[in-house]
């Protein structure tokens, strides 16, 4: 095809479209095309099979995107849990992980993290549940796994040994049980549950030195023994060794920055030292972290009482009256209010 | 590990198709006539688009690098709903794996080819090319060649996986 055709004899030739050879070339372009052919080439057809492929991909994307908000939410909760665990905020981590597992119940890594978190929050129901669910499950042997594996062994300290459990079942009288427990502790000073249970029922009538020595032994073996630290706080407070008690509280908080027991215990120590406002602030912080924690709620009520805020105290006690786990802690506050016991 | 190019083309054919389609769509966007499109074939290159040389140098560059944007965005979008179940949640099903395969194979073909780099080079060699275009264009050619060399060590695949996995994680990190 000759694209150059003279318009009239003697006139300069008009360039014709290279494609159709009929219409004149339009514009200054590298390829001499008429406007119609240029538009045709600009809109070069996309084959049906490519269009079909594109539609197929788009359908898959749309179907996938329907589930994306849920997946994103799980991812956000998981990330928040990871961030919380990095900062040793195990209460937050546990809550976030519970949300993750509610949507993705088969997620092994979340269960592993929940095992760790529930150990530090001492949520024994969840801890036992996770240990049982992860039995026999294979994992990549990383640091994460090693920590959880180690904690699942450490968690045994939260429970009585089989022999102690069997023996305790036989005892019904509390005075005899205490006597029996003491003899058991003498024979098994390494058994954390037995020692801590005995020490936590310590009364002023007894000599504290022996209890101190038993707890010291446990803490020498494992300075992070949570039960032993709690017992140590109790013993130190009972003996008005407030600095020691605060140090033990801090040791708990170093393990779990959101240990509400340690915060509330610190608050009670400050209150006992007549730093009532500081104690109230700290107990408010503990309550805001866990509104279901009876010890923190009772500490706040105690703070209101010591700060001459009876209306707030009574309102708080009344609001928790329906919750039996919290109201049992409030009984101590009521006893302080009614001068049955002295808070110090 | 060296895998023959035709096998990679075969395994990741959705990415090749989208790559060539992206060139074509950018030509359409800039009103550049297209004379031939091969979306996929068992040869080197695995696909190509024959088009008129654009009047604008920028259009020329954009047509060459268009697949980088299209393949990256599309690959990320496709993998987005599947990346978390596959890589984080351990609750993935076959549908999620199909999406990940599509997403990764499309994203890994985002890199412009050496043919695309040659096309940009030809444009830049024109005596009327402005300095700014050259300043942008020459490093771009360098990057394309680095990407091409990098494909020997699976840089393209790593990029694909990075887009498919990294983007959802980035979104979560920003929101959480």
Image: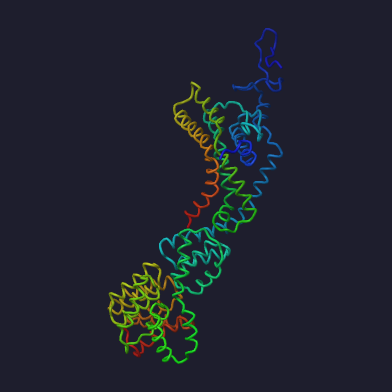
Q: Nearer the viewer, residue A213 or A113?
A: A213
> Would residue B147 be found to the left or right of residue A9 on screen?
left
Q: Nearer the viewer, residue A145 or A66?
A: A145
Q: Quadrant of the N terminus of chain A?
A: top right
Seen from this angle, which residue lies furthest top?
A10
Provide residue B27's location: percent of width, then percent of height: 60, 32
From this view, report whether residue B29 is shown above or below residue A32. Answer: below
Report the residue at 30% width, 86% height from top.
A207
Seen from this angle, which residue lies furthest front?
A187
> Would residue B24 be found to the left or right of residue A253 on screen?
right
Q: Is residue A307 visible?
A: no
Q: Nearer the viewer, residue B51 or A183?
A: A183
From this view, report whether residue B144 is shown above or below residue A35. Answer: below
Provide residue A258's location: percent of width, then percent of height: 40, 68
Q: Quadrant of the C terminus of chain A?
A: bottom left
Provide residue B127's location: percent of width, then percent of height: 48, 21
Provide residue B32's location: percent of width, then percent of height: 60, 29
Q: Is residue A304 visible?
A: yes
| Picture quadrant where residue A47 is located | top right
> Would residue A281 be found to the left or right of residue B40 on screen?
left
- Coloring basis for residues: rainbow
Q: Nearer the viewer, residue A256 or B60?
A: A256
Q: How many marks?
A: 0
Report the residue at 53% width, 44% height from top.
B158
């Amino acid at each position: 095809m000759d694209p150059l055709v003279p318009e009239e004899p003697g006139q300069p030739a008009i360039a014709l479209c290279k494609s159709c050879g009929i219409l004149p070339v339009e514009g200054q372009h590298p390829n001499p095309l008429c406007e119609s052919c240029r538009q045709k080439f600009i809109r070069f057809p996309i084959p049906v099979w490519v269009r079909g492929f594109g539609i197929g991909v788009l359908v898959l994307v749309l179907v996938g995107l329907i589930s994306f908000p849920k997946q994103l939410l799980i991812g956000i909760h998981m990330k928040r849990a990871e961030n919380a665990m990095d900062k040793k905020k195990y209460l937050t981590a546990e809550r976030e992980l519970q949300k993750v597992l509610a949507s993705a119940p088969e997620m092994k890594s979340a269960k592993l993290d929940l095992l760790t978190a529930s150990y530090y929050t001492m949520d024994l129901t969840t801890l036992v549940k996770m240990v049982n669910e992860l039995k026999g499950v294979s994992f990549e042997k990383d640091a994460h796994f090693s920590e959880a594996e180690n904690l699942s062994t450490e968690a045994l300290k939260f429970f009585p040994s089989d022999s102690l459990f069997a023996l305790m079942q036989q005892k019904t009288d509390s005075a005899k049980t205490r006597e029996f427990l003491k003899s058991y502790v003498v024979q098994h000073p390494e058994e954390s549950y037995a020692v801590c249970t005995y020490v936590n029922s310590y009364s002023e009538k007894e000599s504290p030195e022996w209890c101190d020595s038993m707890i010291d032994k446990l803490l020498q073996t494992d300075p992070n023994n949570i039960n032993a630290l709690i017992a140590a706080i109790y013993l130190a407070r009972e003996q008005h060794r407030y600095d020691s008690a605060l140090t033990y509280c801090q040791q708990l908080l170093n393990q779990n920055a959101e240990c509400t027991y340690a915060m509330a215990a610190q608050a009670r120590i400050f209150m006992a030292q007549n730093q009532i406002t500081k104690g109230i602030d700290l107990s408010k912080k503990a309550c805001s972290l866990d509104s279901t924690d009876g010890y923190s709620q009772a500490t706040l009520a105690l703070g209101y009482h010591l700060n001459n805020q009876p209306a707030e105290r009574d309102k708080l006690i009344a609001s928790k009256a329906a919750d039996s786990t919290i109201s049992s802690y409030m009984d101590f506050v009521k006893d302080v209010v009614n001068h049955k016991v002295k808070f110090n | 590990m060296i895998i023959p190019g035709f096998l990679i083309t075969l395994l990741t054919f959705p990415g090749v198709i989208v790559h060539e389609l992206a060139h074509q769509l950018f030509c359409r966007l800039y009103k550049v006539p297209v004379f031939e499109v091969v979306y996929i074939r068992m040869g080197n290159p695995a696909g190509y688009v024959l088009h008129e040389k654009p009047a604008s140098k920028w259009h020329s560059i954009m047509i060459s690098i268009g697949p980088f944007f299209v393949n990256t965005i599309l690959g990320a979008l496709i993998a987005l709903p599947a990346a978390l179940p596959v890589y984080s949640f351990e609750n993935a099903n076959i549908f999620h794996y199909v999406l990940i395969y599509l997403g990764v194979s499309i994203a890994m073909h985002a890199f412009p080819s050496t043919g695309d780099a040659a096309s940009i080079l030809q444009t830049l060699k024109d005596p009327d090319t402005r300095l700014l275009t050259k300043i942008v264009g020459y490093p771009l050619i360098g990057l394309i060649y680095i990407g091409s060399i990098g494909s020997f060590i699976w840089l393209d695949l790593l990029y694909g996986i990075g887009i498919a996995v990294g983007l959802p994680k980035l979104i979560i990190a920003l929101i959480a």
